[in-house]
Structures are given as structure tokens and as C-alpha cells.
Amino acid sequence: MDLMVVTAQRISDRALAADIRWSLDEPINGIRTDIVYKNEASEEMRSVFENAVNREKKIILEVIE
């Protein structure tokens, strides 16, 4: 499962970003995840992965402050 983590600003705390990645790295019920980080400042940049996510996305959690 590919997951895109979108934040308002770049995650400057590398330990936090690593914790998120490693927490989700272990397979759960045989399902592995790949994490991609994105922030609103990089909204202009499109990637092949992001195009695939936008085409097939399922939002599982959205937090708006």
C-alpha cells in the first residue's frame, strides 16, 4: 500500500519523519506500506507517484486545522 503524508509545512524533525516511516514499515496482516511525504509548499511539483495517487486515492484520514 502506498501512503502519501501531506503536511502544511515540511517536516523539519527528521526523527519524527523516521518514526512515522518505521512505525508503518512492518507488515500488518501481510500488507506492506511505502511512505511518501509531501507538503503544501511543494504542491506545484507533480510526480508519477502523485499522479497515480490522485487517480486511485482513498482518503483514510484528513486533519485540517
Image (cartoon, rainbow, N blue to C red):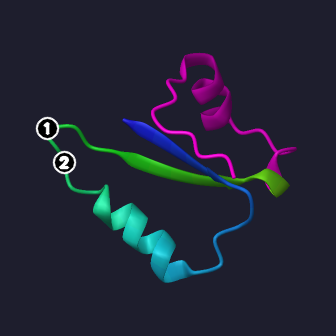
Q: Which residue is mark 1?
A: 30
**Measured Cα–Cα span from mark 2 to mark 1:** 5 Å
Q: Amino acid at mark 2?
A: Pro
Q: Position of residue 11 (x, y in %)?
A: 64, 70
42 to 52, vertically: above or below: below
Q: Position of residue 33 (x, y in %)?
A: 34, 45
Q: Which mark is residue 27?
A: 2
Name the side, left or right, on which 54 lies relative to 21: right
Badges 2 and 1: C-beta atoms under 8 Å apart?
yes
Residue drawn at point x = 71 percent, y = 67 percent: 10
Say which element carries label 1: loop
Which span is picked out in magenta?
42-65
User: Residue 54: within the magenta?
Assistant: yes
Q: How crowded is the residue under tag 1: few (<14 C-alpha within 10 Å), some, or many (20+)? A: few
Residue drawn at point x = 52 percent, y = 29 percent: 59
Query: In the current view of this chain or complex, which residue is farthest to the front?
Result: 65
User: Residue 49: within the magenta?
Assistant: yes
Say which element carries label 2: loop
